[in-house]
Amino acid sequence: MSSDKPHEIVMPQLSLSMDNGLIVQWLKKSGDFVKQGEILLEVETDKSVVEVEAVTSGRLQIERGPEDGPINVGGLIGFLLAEGESVPVSYTTSQKNTPVETPVPQVQSEQLPQPTMVHDDNRRRPPSTPAARRRALELGVDWHLAAPSGLRGQVREQDVIAFADKQRTGKPVLPIRSTALPDVDITPVARRMAEAAGLDLGGLAQSHPGKRLDRGDVEQAIKKSPSTPVGGQSSSLPQPSTRQNPAGATQPAWPLDERQRSLPARHEPIGLLRRVVAEHMEASVHIGAAVTLTTKADATELVHLRNAMKAAGSIQPVPSYNVLLAALVARVLVKHPLLNASLNGEEILYWETVNIGIAVDTERGLVVPVLWDVASKSIKQLSVEAEDLLGRAAAGKARPDELSGGTFTITNLGPMDVDFFTPLINPPQCAVLGVGRLNKEFTAGENDEPIARIMLPLSLTFDHRLVDGAPAARFLKQVKQLVEQPYLW
């Protein structure tokens, strides 16, 4: 390790869609000597929690922690120092707090038309979601020029699509207007809380001169801000900001009524995973044209088949119902390619492999690990692969690349005693299959005698922009047929 420059630990880019990360915890303390390859910390990305190793040896000095909130990729979070080495003052005062511009993948100039770049360099550029940047690259537009509609002036995928549509019609492109909050010395967590509550950060900073505002300061201001002194005198406390959200912007929070404002509550900033789930689900509702079809399948033979596998011990581990359903759904998708496709602007992308995501409930929220090329694999292969992948996903240990690339999703609420429900499509996929609980019911036999059968509720949500009702119904009918006659596949 060079003695003239300490080794910087920066927020790593752990997936292509990652633009910032949240430090969950440091597994080492400042002052500890760390060997190369040891685990330093856990980082929460927009997909999972990932362990970060030390790339060299040295004595650890921590600069930023969980209380700092999301940190941009490349942002300084600590140092590994050689014996006798110290951190120059310039690092802690300037580099630590310098925002790092997130790198955007480069595209060859001949691949996409080059938009006219119009920027106001004196204003801070608004943030954007990974989906927005990817769509901007696909459409050949500059996402900085799109009118933001997300929280804190964030440019979302639908903003990019709307901007691209306007650009194609020849309407003039106007510079973006910054919706950034005032430049106040405040922790990221406190800033998010202040914005959600509509506090005037400038006024709050004036009431704490020379101090870096933290979560406690904001919580105190939130408690005091609704009240007005008797006699109508104006309060010296920070008041809610009158800053307007851009047209169509998502509101930070639903307005609280007067009684709710006085109720005790625990304030907790939204996590990265929940933010991504919320963004995807909102896009699913507002961008697509979702329709849900439901049916019941007689799963008696499927249950008998799985019990026979368990008794014979021929396949280890015994495939779960999710694995069996993924295998049969993949075979149906091969014959119904529109359900394994994506609508991409003016074209349809027919995916050549069937990659099925299985929704998994975790303590952090919903994640969807993906089984790749399911149609070409045997039940045994899928069972082994799924046990490992789904187990790690449930524990929050799945890699970011294992949580992307899906072309169809299965979500199973049967273990929670749910029958029918309306699953939401995971954009940019075309459809999702919801699975309910296995339930014994009596049906009429050939001579109208009651026969006990095991029924399985199925709910298919599809994007009507891409698939009509009849093809979707035929797909669901064939899924039902293979559930009822599993020996066909």
Image (cartoon, rainbow, N blue to C red):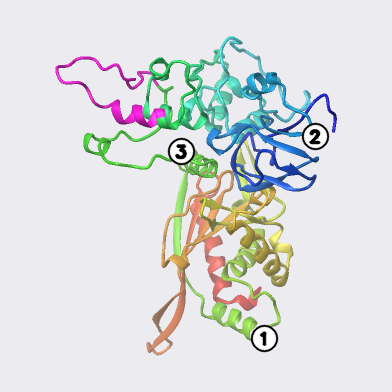
Q: Earlier in the sequence, mark 3 or mark 1?
A: 3
Residue at mark 1 to residue at mark 2: CA–CA distance? 62 Å
Report x, y in % for residue 430.
57, 49
Q: Earlier in the sequence, mark 1 or mark 2?
A: 2
Give amino acid for label 2.
Glu
Residue at mark 3 to residue at mark 1: CA–CA distance? 50 Å
Residue bearing the label numbered 3: 269
Instruction: Pick the residue in front: 266 or 27.
Output: 27
Residue at mark 2 to residue at mark 3: CA–CA distance? 39 Å
Give the number of the disc on residue 83.
2
Residue pictured at 61% horizontal, 51% vertical: 338
Give amino acid for label 3.
Pro
Residue pictured at 51% horizontal, 51% vertical: 365
Please determine whether, in this image, residue 445 is positioned above or below residue 134.
below
Residue pictured at 50% horizontal, 44% vertical: 274
Specify the quadrant of the image occupied by residue 32.
Answer: top right
Report x, y in % for residue 103.
70, 28
Residue bearing the label numbered 1: 312
Work out which residue is located at the far front of the displayed protein and give it: 84
The C terminus: image quadrant: bottom right
88 in magenta: no
Q: Secondary structure at mark 1?
A: helix
Give amino acid for label 1.
Ala
Give the number of the disc on residue 462.
none
242 in magenta: yes
Residue pictured at 24% horizontal, 15% vertical: 234
